[in-house]
Image (tube, grey):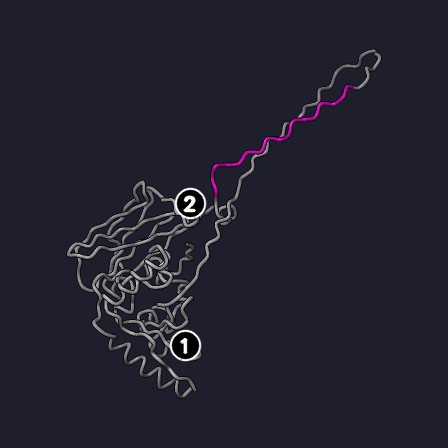
Amino acid sequence: MGISRRRTAAVGCAFVLVSVAGVDAATAAPRPATPTPPPATPTPAPPAVQRTSASVAAPALAATGTARSRLALSVGRGSTLVVVGVLTRASNGTPLPRRVVDVYVRTADTGTWRLATTVRTSSSGRAVYRLPDRPRLQITLRFAGSSRFTPAASVTIVPDPSATAMQPGLVRALAAAKAAARRAGHSLVVNSGYRNWTTQQRMYAAAVRTYGSARVARRWVLPPQESTHVRGLAADIGTPATAAWLTRHGAAFGLCRAYGDEPWHFEYRPDWIKAFHGRCPAPVPLPGDPDPLSPAPRVAVVF
């Protein structure tokens, strides 16, 4: 995983309520003519009352009635995993209390997703779930949404990495892709492959110190429990021309580009290719967006 930049514009919108008074005309019976008094100087009408609601919304709210949200996820390691999701408004970071969050689990990476439980967020927007650890476990939290808020991102976690080195399938796929790339006039270079848990954690911690928050650090490097490099499924590919070629032809080797903002990051994903009938799915916009086989795939997510 490498560098990405994202800007979220939160533009306040005001709903304006204007009261307009109507005037009823009455019909009177004819009367004898009387002298008409001189017209009085008209009194200026008071200005219309303009009131603004207390709600401040992103432009999407005015257009569609929905607001943006963000679901962050963390997992504490141990024999019992403590899964914590935090649901907030993306525009200003305020918590979203009493919202429904679904917890899905499966065996990585090809097991069937199972709805483990449904929880509601607390007054601080937190949803907590505990479950026993087991090898090759994946956990996904998905905000179910409501009439006011769009679905938030789900995040896939593998607390126990399933690889101690690059997966054999990925090694074979890269060898075949390298030979085909050479025939097409490209030189395939693996700039980064397997990283152990400690290395990935060190990189992530350094990013948190550099950028001041875990939320921003995730744009640069994922924590080890989310990294497919740690699981031996990912490789960062050069040259840029080769990476572009592999984006077009990678499905033939079981390789798919994973992130829209990282043209060099490829993963060994025969399960994706099977699910999408011989093709790679479109890359998700950014790390942390729902993967193509999340419980509700292909949901547009805005952070």
Q: Nearer the viewer, residue 12 or 144?
A: 12
> Is 169 on the left-hand or right-hand side of 244?
left
Check whether the beta carbons of the residues at disc 1 and disc 2 lie within 8 A of each other.
no
| Quadrant location of the C terminus in the rendered image | bottom left
Disc 1 secondary structure class: helix
- Name the one closer to the observer, 239 or 111: 239
Looking at the image, which residue sits at the far bottom? 183
Boundaries of the magenta span:
40-56
> At 34% across and 42% down in the image, what residue appears?
97
The amino acid sitting under disc 2 is: Ser
**Element type at marker 2?**
loop
Find residue 147 and name its label: 2
* Residue at left offset 23%, top offset 69%: 196
Picture coordinates of residue 218 (x, y %)?
Answer: 35, 60
Which residue shows up at 37% across the image and 85% down it? 180
Q: Residue at x 34, y 48 (%)?
A: 87
Report crowding for label 2: few under 14, some 14 to 19, many 20 or more residues within 10 A (C-alpha).
few
Q: Tag 2 or tag 1, which sits nearer the N-term?
A: 2
Residue 207 drawn in magenta: no
Most common secondary structure along the magenta stretch: loop
- Quadrant holding the N terminus: bottom left
Residue 11 in picture, x, y percent from top left: 51, 48
> In the image, residue 113 lies at what x, y percent?
27, 59
- Residue 208 drawn above or below residue 31: below
Amino acid at circle 1: Ala
Marking on residue 243 = 1
Foreground mark, 1 or 2, reads 1
Image position, residue 12 (x, y; %): 51, 45
